[in-house]
Amino acid sequence: MPRLEIRDLAFNGGAPVNLTIEPAECVALSGPSGGGKTMMLRAVADLDPHGGDAFLDGSAASAMPAPIWRRRVGFLPADSPWWYDRVGDHFPTVDNSALQTLGFEEDVLKWTVRRLSSGEKQRLALLRLLVRKPEALLLDEPTANLDPDSGARVERLLADYRDEYAAPVLWVSHSAEQAGRVARRRFAMKDGELREASF
Amino acid sequence: MTQAITLTPLDLSIAALLVVGLGVLGLPLRLRLTRQIFVAALRTTIQLLLVGLVLKWLFGAVNPLWLLLIALVMVLAAAREVVNRQERRFRGAWGFGMGASAMFLSSFAVCIFALTIVIRNQPWYDPRYAIPLLGMLLGNTMNGIAIGLDRLTQTAWQQRAILEARLSLGERWSEAVRQIRRESIRGGMIPIINAMAVAGIVSLPGMMTGQILAGSPPVEAVKYQILIMFLIAAGSGFGTIAAVSAGSRRLFDERERLRLDRLKET
């Protein structure tokens, strides 16, 4: 059962951050734009130089090659770009039931990326991450561009994934309602400082 | 063998009027190139006159040490030129060092190969062969490397989000940058491939033209030109591959993070 531990993580010149997310727990992270939420996720995913360390299931990020660490802690950026022409080329494997949960037919994999709307891109970017079976999830506003129905589908899919793989989830959200729905613990990041927020 | 007609300073001045005309035409068109055109034309005149004097002296003194010194000056100047042509160059010594070492390795290796194995002149460091050969190699290698590195850093800058998304999905740095590296190497090699493809049909290469003007039989000049084309293709190709590969690696750190802060902002 993977537990995500963030120890004295220092990034962007802020105070060191400590946070432990239990297996199958979802922690919501909110705060003003530019407050450092994205920077925190990037530091956990080891995409930026940082102080401190992060541990998954007891093993330190610094003790394993960075690509392996990143594969294990799936980071979903707020704006996920596409680089091949076809949607399917970005997918190593297919998960039909997940496609259906998000409201896609299987033939979406044959589509060209240009055909996708921004909401479709966002949902498929999540799927592209989940088929790689990360043990934890670092989500940067995964429903930001979605209509309420699609947003609910994404929340359901993520809840299923979290339960099935006992994955710790760190979810950046601007919506207090969403944070209340998906997480029991909520934190706010302001001026680079992490504080537990009460409901 | 007919001797080439000697050009007088007056002949060159008349030709210079064309460049002056070009610069003046640039003013109403607001090309903002007039100053650059004049500076470049002036540089060409002074540099070539100086090198003429140096060569005249060097050809009298066949000494590998002098040759090496001149060759080093040429490589350093070419490396500086590569750096100056970068829109977003690598910070610090790397920007200069990668271009310089790639150019040094590939131009010197190809040049020495040609002198000792193909041309076999005695001694191989006779500057009458070595300097023009190295000059042509360096000039073209410099272009390839400059285009390749510029393409690499520009594209990486524009595609930062893609590179980081690929790293986030667990790709190695080499997988993430593969397409950009390939396109950059292609960009650096295309000029010489095109030059080989049209040589003799569309363009008469400068060296061959020079030899013919100086009175060489055309077929002899052509054979040298073919040799030079092959050497340039190899030299600039290997140099571009080496420089772009080193540059691609330098875009990432030991934790395989994309480090665009290693590039100078424009």
Image: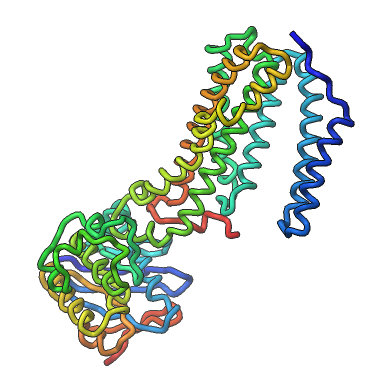
Pinpoint residue B239: horizontal percent, then vertical percent: 51, 33
- Residue B76 location, quadrant: top right
In this rendering, would B95 be left or right of A106?
right
Pinpoint residue B60: horizontal percent, then vertical percent: 78, 13
Pinpoint residue A194: horizontal percent, then vertical percent: 37, 80
Front residue (pair B233, A63): B233
Pinpoint residue B218: horizontal percent, then vertical percent: 63, 14
Residue at 12% of width from left, 71% of height from top? A100
Q: Is residue B203 visible?
A: yes
Residue at 19% of width from left, 82% of height from top? A152
Task: Report the quarter where the N terminus of chain B lies.
Answer: top right
- Residue A29 location, quadrant: bottom left
Q: Is residue B105 above or below residue A102?
A: above
Q: Residue furthest right?
A: B10
Task: Report the quarter where the C terminus of chain B lies.
Answer: bottom right
Front residue (pair B140, B22): B22
- Residue A187 location, quadrant: bottom left
Front residue (pair B36, B158): B36
